[in-house]
Amino acid sequence: MKTLTLSLLLAATAVPAFATELTVWDWKSGDPLAAPYYQKAKEVFEAAHPGDTVTYVMQPNDQYYTLLGTALASDGGPDLFLLNGGAQARARFENAVKLDDKIGDMKADLAGLPEFSDANGIYAIPLTIQGFVVYYNKALYTAAGLDPNTPPKSWDDLSKICAAFVAQGTVPCIALGNKEGFGMEFWFSAIAASLWTPQEQADFAAGKLAWSSPQVLAVLQSWIDANAAGWFPKGANSTAKFMDEYEGFMRGESANTIGLISDVAHWKSFDEMLGAENLGVFLLPAPGGMAAKIPAAGGIGYAVNAKSPNVDLAVEFAKTLAAPEVLQVFFNDAGAVTANTKMDTSAVTSPAAKTIFGWLASDVVPMAHTNATAQELEEIHRQSQLLLNGETTVAEAAAAMDVVAKAARQ
Amino acid sequence: MANRSEQRIAILFVLPAVALVAVFRMFPLAWGFLLSFTSGDGAGGAKFVGLDNYRALTTDAAFHDSLINTLILLATLPIWVMLPLLLAILIHQGVPGGKLFRAVYFFPAVLSAVIIGSIFNVVLRYDGSLNAALKSVGIEAVDWLGQGATALACLITVQLWATFGMSVLIFMAGLSTVSSELVEAARLDGAKPAQIWWHVILPAMRPILEFVAVVTTIGVLTSMFGLIYVLTAGGPGTATTLPEFLIWMEQGKMNRPGYAAAISMVLFVGMAGLAFVQIRIMSRNANT
């Protein structure tokens, strides 16, 4: 009995008097590819802070922001919470700790900060960079009589390539899943990246570039032109982008697909299914002959709850999550393109990944759709489906978008 | 004294039920009602905006489309009632294999909307089995779920397939309660089978018919979310968007709980009105 009492006493004194449990909300920590990264971050942090613990709470993806909003509104919620960069992040800045003076030691190493900042400062630490590129199946290019090592550089080049696939009639030129309207999101940002000037991108983000402006109309027109030319498969409106479109691409059922650069539907998963030597990548050109650019932005990042009683410790853990040695696990396992530029990517062997990293080091432009409001995104999902079906015109769709944008941006 | 004591006991017996209704029905309803007068995404605290959410509904094209879709859905109500009745009559008449048909009809009722949606996704998608069958006989494939002209009809048909078995069972139960003496008396009076059905059995079945009509109306307006979510996601455009799906979109995807609550209130008032009319008709018929 004495031994037991002594043991309990020793155990109690071994834990610091102010041991803290940090609660972290996300929608990814249970994902098999992301789990080792989250475990690594927890281990590194808990080793550096004996007695303090980290608890991940994975919320359902489609209800995440509703649950988070409710928790934050009740002055509760987690110590840290994961955010998508852009509009979703900005909507939560009022609940987040301003981090400018807390991450001074790593700020210079972080890409993707604009999506987690506003004019007042930085409110979240980005983990990943997300962007859109076009992946293509080299074997299908060869079968269509095309040079698999000469991807299109202009809209004319792309038109010729797609004309070859349309003439052959075996596989669609560009895979498209638009059941939820995500196909349009990807197309919109990829075309706008190569079509718009930096000022036009900034004006769209600020709501000054109307949907009925010539610049946006050109993007919408390219959508129906591509469809009218037979580039997209039939049935796109009843095909889910995640993952029906990508599973079809990986089965060799389409020549090209607009995919992501990080996390899912990206070079790593396509390399594994098609073979790295059989996967090519290019940037979607836009009508007009301008040089194609890569649309990329801060993907996901962690904010610290302003109402957390453990702000300093939570900031420490957010920095741990964004540390190069921890993110290396995320990169190795999930192919996540991380926001910390100090992370070593030299070991990557994927030709597609190397090409993408080269683009990221040069001319990166915004992902236009992330600067639209949630209401605008929902409406463009709907309008894009009607455009594919020929149930509306570009002018009508743009007018409907202007109405929604005006109400949403009031 | 005895009366007062009995009253107390009666109140005690009723209290749990009243408490459950108050906590799980009335309180959320009142909360939703108050929420519909607020704005914000929930993160910065709700702000009182008066009738702004209801005013916004008057110019919301998606909401208007969802109401039109609801009216189309309600217009199909006779099919939802008469088809199961017809099938129940056939089984009741003792068609060969009646027991098998009864089980087969009821089987979809035990499947969840997600499973049914997944099954029909495979059947109805552009490269699905229905189009494969059509192509095999030389008919061009149709994007059943991706075109405005067919998507809602497909959704209604799938929901009907999934739920009509329950109505068949209810009608069969109703048919078994029709007095055999009445039917026999009519037959002895020289009535033909069709006359017996029209003048004897159907009048006796009227309360059951009305019950099925009420339950089906409420069901189709409040239980199609899962199917819409899996099959069409409300599209193309707003072709298959119903108010309940719009509520989820506004609440779950656009973080506008106040606006979602306003749509909920409109749906609640509409359904309550519809149910009230139907129940009044049932009561009137019961008293005649």
Image (cartoon, coloured by chain):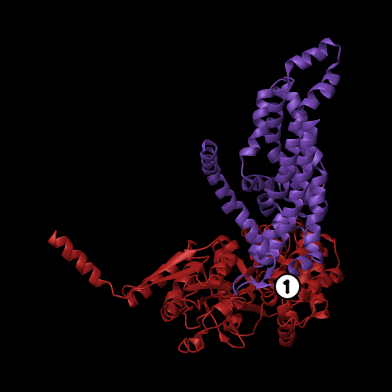
A256 vs B83: above or below: below
Q: Is residue B24 left or right of residue A381?
A: left
Position in image of residue A270 (x %, y %): 58, 64
Q: Colour of chain B?
A: purple
Which of A335 and B277 lies nearest the eye of the viewer? B277
The structure residue drawn at horizontal position 61% and vertical position 38%, both measured from the top left corner, is B110
Q: Which element carries disc 1, helix, strand or loop? A: helix
Q: Colour of chain A?
A: red
Mark 1 is surrounded, within 10 Å at the Cα level, by few (under 14), some (14 to 19) or many (20 or more) other residues, namely: many
Residue A365 is drawn in which quadrant?
A: bottom right
Tally of marks: 1
Query: Which residue lies most toward the front here?
Result: B1
Which of A349 and A82 lies nearest the eye of the viewer? A82
Say what amino acid the circle numbered 1 marks. Phe
Quarter occupied by the C terminus of chain B:
top right
B175 vs A390: above or below: above
Report if residue A338 is visible in the image.
yes
Position in image of residue B77 (x %, y %): 79, 41
Position in image of residue B23 (x %, y %): 57, 53
Q: Is residue B211 left or right of residue A13?
A: right
Residue at the spot of label 1:
A188
* Subunit under mark 1: A
Position in image of residue A136 (x %, y %): 65, 67
Residue B247 is drawn in which quadrant?
A: bottom right
Q: Is residue A251 left or right of residue B265?
A: left
Query: Which residue lies most toward the top here?
Result: B188
